[in-house]
Image (spheres, rainbow, N blue to C red):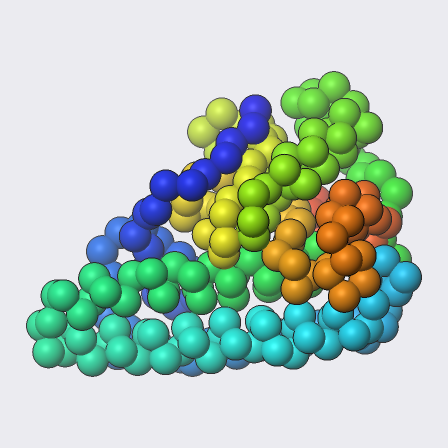
Amino acid sequence: MLRSVSSPVRTFISGGALSTSSPVSVSTRKKHTLPDLPYDYGALEPTISADIMKLHHGKHHATYVTNLNVAEEKLAEAKAKGDISAVIALAPSLRFNGGGHINHSIFWANLSPKGGGEPSGELADLIKRDFGSFATFKERLSGATVGVQGSGWGWLGYNKVAKRLEIATCPNQDPLEATTGLVPLFGIDVWEHAYYLQYKNVRPDYVKNIFNVANWTDVATRLYNAKK
């Protein structure tokens, strides 16, 4: 099943998790921080260059974290004043920057210099059950991701209700779970800053090559946790 999401959903951040419910108190929250990469900036070459990784992690992701903290501080102030209009006005910033932080934190862990190949175990079994084969899954996820209009993400997610894997796309930095209910397992970032310095406008080549560094061990762990 393929999902494509474009309609806005108001979201709020609490304790690092994105929720579509009403905002809760953030007066005792801890500030979000940029996660360290589990590998060097150049470790994913030749699939992703060190220059791209430095900009993507050290600049773009860092900016999402900074802006998320600012938005949460403003949210706390607005709530303390009982300013409902200000609370509502902050929703887009929380959605964009909170989603950017969530998405990229997953993305870095989804990649590994020792990645690639095909998954094994339960993840492989579910891919075969829900898509027919790994090759078909790869083709469908790649096609959906390449087809994202403008900026966004392609995802493999787990549907906890149907108990099956699904492919979905989200625009901009919309977070998968808060937007669709699917638990994110494997994401492909197709914002141009993720690939343009190296692949120019040839997005299909970038998406094809990202599977060479896919960390299926991390994806399998996310599947295990999603099924609890």
- x, y percentage for residue 150? 56, 49
- x, y percentage for residue 191? 61, 57
Picture quadrant of residue 51: bottom right
Looking at the rendered structure, the number of numbered marks drawn on it comes to 0
- As displayed, is residue 73 above or below residue 5? below
Left or right, residue 161 beside residue 116: left
Q: Could you say which is closer to the camera, residue 78 or residue 15?
A: 78
Q: Could you say which is closer to the camera, residue 110 or residue 123?
A: 110
- x, y percentage for residue 49? 83, 67
Residue at horizontal 18%, vertical 70%? 86
Residue at horizontal 70%, vertical 55%? 110
Instruction: Tell me the quarter of the image containing the N terminus.
Output: top right
Residue at horizontal 9%, vertical 72%? 82
- As displayed, is residue 112 above or below residue 66? above
Picture quadrant of residue 14: bottom left
Left or right, residue 104 beside residue 29: right
Residue at horizontal 88%, vertical 43%? 117
Any part of residue 31 in sight:
yes
Q: Could you say which is closer to the camera, residue 98 or residue 118?
A: 98
Q: Could you say which is closer to the camera, residue 171 or residue 35?
A: 171
